[in-house]
Structure formats: structure tokens, C-alpha cells
Image: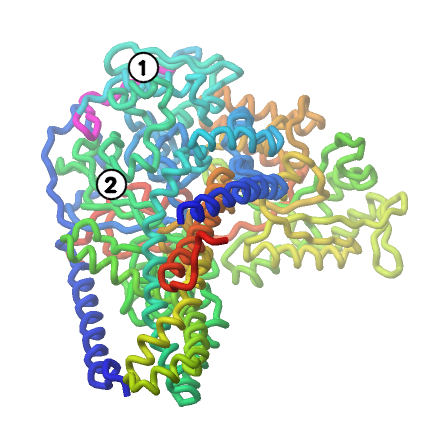
Amino acid sequence: MLSFLIRRIAAAVPLLFGISVLVFLLMAIAPGDFLDVARTQQDIPEEYIERMEEEFALDQPWYARYASWLGNVVQGNFGESWIYRIPVADLLKQRIPATLVLSALSILFALCIAIPLGVLAAIFKDSIFDRLSSMFAYAALSIPEFFLALLAVMFAANTGLFPVGGLTSMDHEFMPFWSRMVDYAHHLVLPTLVLGMGSVASYMRIMRANFLDYIRADFVTTARAKGVGEGRVMFVHVLRNAINPLVSASGFILASLLSGSILVENVMNYPGLGQLIFEALMRQDEFVVVAAVLMGCIMLMLGNLIADLLLAWFDPRIRLDKN
Amino acid sequence: MLPFFSSTSLTCLVRQVLGAVLVLILVTVCGCQEETWSIQRSRHDLPRDAEVSESRPGHYGGVFVTAESQQPRTFHPLVAEDAYSSQVISLFLNGLTTYHPHKEKVVPELARSWDISADQRTITMYLRRGVRWSDGEPFTADDVIFTFEALFDERYPNRYQGQYTIAGQPIEFAKVDRYTVRFSTAKPYSPFLYVIGFIGILPRHILEKACESGELLQKWSVRTAMHHPEQLVGTGPFRIRSFKPGQRAILEPNPHYWRVDSKGQRLPYVNYLVNRYVQDRNTETVLFASGQIDVASIDPGDVVGVRENEKLHGYKVHHRGPASGISFIWFNQKPGTNDQGQPYVQPHKLKWFTSQEFRQALLYGFNREGLIQSVYFGRAELLHSIISPANQRWYNPDVPKYPYDPARARQVLQEQGFRLSPDGKLYDKSGNRVEFEVYASEGSSTTPQILSTFRENMKALGIKVEIRYLDFGTLVARISRHFEYEAAAMGFTGGVDPSGGRSIYLSSGRLHVWNPGQEEPQTGWEARVDELIRSSEETFDLDERVEYMHRMQQIFSEQLPLLYLLTPHAYAGVKTKWRNVQIPPMGSVIWNIDELYLDPES
């Protein structure tokens, strides 16, 4: 187990290294730089811009900037955001909780809806329910998240049932504790639905397909022949086997939720990482961009690692240590 | 059927969910009531030199909500370089002077008055006595000296260093006594009183340690505002109560603010000022039109739609007149060659671009009047000068104008030796086809419409124009560093005092876009403009300064290095329940936020 973990983490290092080089290179090739906005402001003196170019090492080639960045990273310093003038780590730390809550809730939401729906669709294969749920799945998969987010914003604005974006109400800090929790919940409903909807559909299809595979398996027939009750056959024997691919799929979901959340957060005005990364990209705030990309990669690898571990735990046939 | 998915339990579940949603709604509705926004105002003695507001006295209370499409990146005036950070900083810090948008002149802020010496190089500022910082510490000349020492400290580069360097010399400053500071400049510099107000005076007792240890610029970041807003100590009308990035800042009245009304009530009247951070201008407009915020700037295209809800949500959309910015198309007139020995502009094209008559002919041939109707539905006007008509004090209404007159355009081109071929193509004396590319930045909704009209109008003159849209960064790189372009379209936001436009007007300026950064003025008229600016900055007589600036505008409109486009009209919406609202032609709509109060009837 431990050697497996060490191997996976060791394999990640060169990957992250390569990605960081690529990000710096791409940022250097991209036209313009962080100071463009200052350059077109008439009342910012030229000396100041030159001074800033020097300070941000923008007058040097990208590999020189990369080298000094790498030197700092080795010492645990991810640099300072040029926009905010605070350490990148601090900046990301402000925003991570909001995004993690949203991601976790949408995964949870997706699983809670998708597993029962998938199972039901498999059990009642070809029924009206199965057809309807397939239709829903295809529709949900084909609607891009940002569009769904726009629809949700419109829904909220027209009905007034939900807040139009944000994470808290204006008077949030004046509320007692429980009202504040309710306020969070109220604001989280729509973003969770929007972000989770796509995963519901894909989880459901995976669940249905696997469930159908196992319904016809020999051990199911055996169990039935032995007189095990139908509910037990379905929910103990079949479900436990059918759920494995879902676990490995959720490793990728963690990363895809993060990328999906960039768009959704921007449309729904949700104060998470998405907004920050988007702004950093637009302004070419180099260290924030590279840190954000690296974090996305780490999330992806971590997600996969967790999925593998869970799989091993669920499925006694899988042994991590034997290669 | 399966036991735990029976229909009864399902209905039960649905009922529970619906119930929960209802509770949520009820809680939020109750939460929106005004009582949550009450405030305890502590009573402190008024400063000896408190300023008495000239506006009508009002009543305490109310929450004023604004939406900002960008959020502050810092709360430190020496770090801030964008308008959004400066805007929030100006709510809790004061300068020595400030610009009064209605009186159109510099008025006292932390300085109660000033003297200008006979040689006009020494300005003595008398500070308001008895003013206290928001934490109760007294404000004195030491704070002013501290601020300027930090500003000129080599360790802390900032935009003000250049602004406060006059004729190559940093301004000098010295404390005379507890409430008097003396400034001197190397040469008489009349915008001094205006620019000296830009920097918010910093509290020495809070920042001195950080300044000594070289960490001044790390202070007062967004982190400070999030976790320790009480450390953001200022003299302004408000102090930061809380700041949530991506969401909002809530400001509360500074209990030590130095302005009072004629009844002796300390300003500001509002209990809280909330800045909500939204994604873009459109969201701001939507929030305003649905009654959720108290003030918004409205684009000319949205005016009709927003006005539909005026009665329903109790607001009014006010017409502010022409916007303060200027927009234009210009030609690259940079002579010489780049590093590879290639000319920046092909020589035969440079000949056209540097011809005043060629530029004038093109502007005559451009149907800007038509654009006002088709793009802005009449809510715009022609721009004739390098200073927008919004800037009433400095704008010269009598500059040469170039109304749409295609016949005149053809005539001028013909006089300059351009020939129209039988198939309608224009050639210059040497037989080169007249054609050029215009670069513009992506993202604006009106630029493509304006430029398409330009292209069609030019086609009618026989000129082939290609329009290319570039990413903003690429455009800036091309026009300011590589000079690899023929023509470009852009705009600048307008400032109040023309000294803010030096980098455009002066031939050595960075934004003298058609030929920036000249070591010596390369044409006679550019030399004349440089001279006019120098003269205008050396005289403290306002009428004389205005006269110089009128002459400068005259030269620019004659020479036409910039083909002026249009200036759309500006609109601002404010809820009608607010009193003392005085919308100036340019600048912030709520510049007098400390004087706004809630109509007791509402």
C-alpha cells in the first residue's frame, strides 16, 4: 500500500514539472503581458511602468523567470500575485473552501440522484421510466454547463425563489448562526444543481449499463436459485459489483468539476477559485495562473489516487501492491 | 416493487423537501428586513476645523448599495493602480485637496487652506486642526510628512513618484508646525493643487513600523481587509466593516469624520454603504433595473429598457450629457526602422499618414452623423476635440470641425494629387493604391459598427480599408512597443485637469500614440503644443491656463493626428428615495455620498 502511494507521488513530480514549463512557455507566447492595462492609462508615468517591468522580470526571457520561480517553489514559496500583491498561496486559500464545498456538494448530489435512477432504469429496463431517464440523461449531457448556469440565473431572477448568484446575502454578517447556514444553503442550491447535472447524467448511464451487465451474471442466477430475496439480490449482490466503475469515474469527476466550475462560477457570480483563475488568465497574472493550473493537475491526480484506493477497498480482487 | 421506494415514502419525501424550501424562503424574506441594518453611532467631539457641508441637512439611516464590476485589488494607495481600488480607498482615506465636480475647481480636504508664495514655487498647506483618525488618534502634519516620505522612498516604487516629480525634481516638503506643511517645486507648477490631492494621507501611527522594516507595500492588502478591517485606519467618511472578495465590501460611518451638516450632525447619514461585486457592467444594469442597487451608470443602448421600470422600483435615469472619454482612429506616423531594418510604416504610406490634408479628407468622408442615429439612436454626439465636451471648464467649443462632406473629401484628396481610377479606386501621385489596415481591440459592442461604417465610407472615396480585431494585449504591444501597424482605433477615459493627459499631448509622451516618445518634437505643431502645455503648467491663473488649453485643442483639431469618433451620452440611474443627489457631468455619480440621506417619506 505504502509503496504504491510513494510510486504514484514520485510519478507526479516530473509531470508537474513539465506542466509548469508549458504554462510559462504558453504565457510568454501569448501576446501582451500583465502591464498592458497600466500602459494604456494616461496618468501612469513611464518610469513606474519600467520599474514594474524590472520588478516582475518581464524584461527577461521566460526561462529566466521560470528558473527563479522554480527556485522559490522548492523553498515552498509560490510567488506573489501581481494583481493583488499578496502571496499566491494566500490568494488561493481564500477561495478554495467555496469551490471545494460546491464541488463536494455537486458530487454528492450527482451520486445521490444518479445511483438510484441508474438502478431503477436498469431494473425497469425499457419501461417508460427508463426511456424518460435516458432522455433526461442525453439532454443533460448535451447542454453545456455555462448555458445551464445562464438558465438557472434566469430562473432565479424571474421567480425570485433563489438568489441571483453569490454565496451569501448582503446582510449575511448581521444574521445569527443558523440563519447564516440557511443562507449558505439557499445560495448553494442552484450552483450545485447546475454543476452536478452533467455528472448525474453520466453517472446514471454508467450505473445503468453496469447494473444490466451484472443482472445477467451467473452469480445472480445462483443467488436467485438459492432463494435469496429479490431486494437482497439487487442491492447487495448486483449493486456492490456494479458500483466499481463509478468509483473510478469519480476520480476524473473531481478534476472536471473544477474546470466546469470556472465557467459556472463566473456566470453565477460565485466567489470561488473560478473567478480568480479567470481574472488571472485575462490579466496574465503569471504566478497565479501557473499555481492554479498546477492545483488543477494535483486535484486530478489526487482524485484518481483516491479512486484507486477506494476501489481496492471496495473490491477485494484488486491488490495495489502486486504490480 | 421495492420496499424503500414505495410511492408513499416518495410523496413524504417530496413534501419534506418542499417544506424545507418554504422555510428557506421565509427565512430569507425575513432576513431582508431593515432592522438587521441598524447601527450604534458613537458620539465624539467635532474637530475644531470641521467642515460644514453646504447641502441641505438630512436624517441618519438607510443602506446605500452599489454594484462594482471590478473589485479592489488592494487597499493601499501606493499599490493601487486601477480605478476600482482607488475608488474604495477614497472612501476611507482623504487627500490634502480634492476636486469639486460641480464647482469645477480644487477644494480643501485635509488641508483647510493654502498660501502660494510670490514666486509660486512654495505652497504652504494649513491642515484641519482637531481631525482624528478613525481609531481616535489625532491627525497632524507628521502623518502628511510620513506619507510623502514613504511615497518617495526608493524601496516602494509607486505611480505617484513620477507624478510628483516636477521638472526632474521631486517636490520638497517640510513640516512647519503641528498643523502646517510646506511644499516646494523646482518650477511653478499650477496643477500642483490638483495632483497633490491624489494621494490618500496615511496614518503614521499604524504604518510607521512597516515602513521602516521595508514591508510597507505588503500592508493593507485584500488580506488585511478580509481579516483585520479595523487596521485600515483613515480619515474618510467611511471605514471598512468587512470585505469578502468576489462578494461585497460593507462600509460603516467613520465616527471621527470631519464633515458636519449645518445642524451639527456628523456626516455621513447612511448607516452602511455596501459595494457588491458583480461580473460585468450588464449585471450591474440588471441589478439596478430590478431595484436591487441604488445607483448605476447606464449605457445609452440600455436607457429605454431601464426606464421602463422607473415607477415600479422607484428610480430615475438621469441624462449626464456627453461622456468624458474620447475615442479615435489614428495613423502610425512613426518614422525610422525596427531592429531588423524594416520601416515601421511603408514609406509611401507614411507620406499619406503624415499629411494633414489626407487625414482631414478622411474625416470629412466619414459619416459619423449617420452613426449617431444607427448605433446610438441619437444618444451621442460628434467629437471635435481632444478634450471631451463633458469637461466643460477646459473644452474648446470653437475648434475646427469636420462634418460629413464626401464631396469636400474628394476635392481635398484631388488637390493633394490623389487620383481616382475609372473603376473607383484611389491612387496616390506615385501610382500606389490607397489602402490600409485598422487594428481594433475585441470586446466592444459598438466598435465593429463604427469601423464597418468607416470602411464603407472609405470605400466610397476609393480607399480600401481592412479591419482586424486583436486581443487587447496584442494591440497594446503593437502600438506601444513594436509600432507594427498602419492605423488603429482606441479610446481613453477622460480626466478632469488636462495635466492628466500629458502623456498623450506631449511629443515625448508614452501615449502620444501616432509617434510616441519623441526626443525632440519632430514637427512644428508638436513643438507648439509642448510649449503651450509648459506655459499652462507654469501659470496659476485659471483663465490663462484654460486659454492655453483652448489653443492646444485648436492645434490638435487642425492637425488631426487623431480622427475623432463620437462621444456617447452618459446616463446614470439613482433611486428617488435619496436626497441631496447632485449628478455632475463627469466623475462619480455619488461623489457626495457623505451628504446623501433617505427621504423620510419613503
Where residue B16 sits: x, y (%)? 19, 75
Q: Quadrant of the N terminus of chain B?
A: bottom left
Q: Residues within 10 Å of mark 1 (few under 14, many from 20)?
A: many
What residue sits right under mark 2 in the picture? B594
Q: Residues within 10 Å of mark 2 (few under 14, many from 20)?
A: many
Q: Is residue A271 left or right of residue B530?
A: left
Q: Is residue A322 left or right of residue B62?
A: right
Residue extent of the magenta highlight: B123-136
The residue that appears at 58% across and 25% down in the rendered structure is B532
Of mark 1 and mark 2, the one earlier in the sequence is 1
Q: Residue furthest bottom?
A: A127
Q: Which sits in the foreground, B537 or A260?
A: A260
**Label 2 is placed on what type of residue?**
Asp
Q: Is residue B237 left or right of residue A295?
A: left
Where residue B371 sits: x, y (%)? 60, 59
Would residue B389 be seen by someone viewing this image from the given angle?
Answer: no
What residue sits right under mark 1 in the picture? B181
Tag 1 subunit: B
Q: Which sits in the foreground, B100 or A147?
A: A147
Where residue B70 sits: x, y (%)? 41, 46
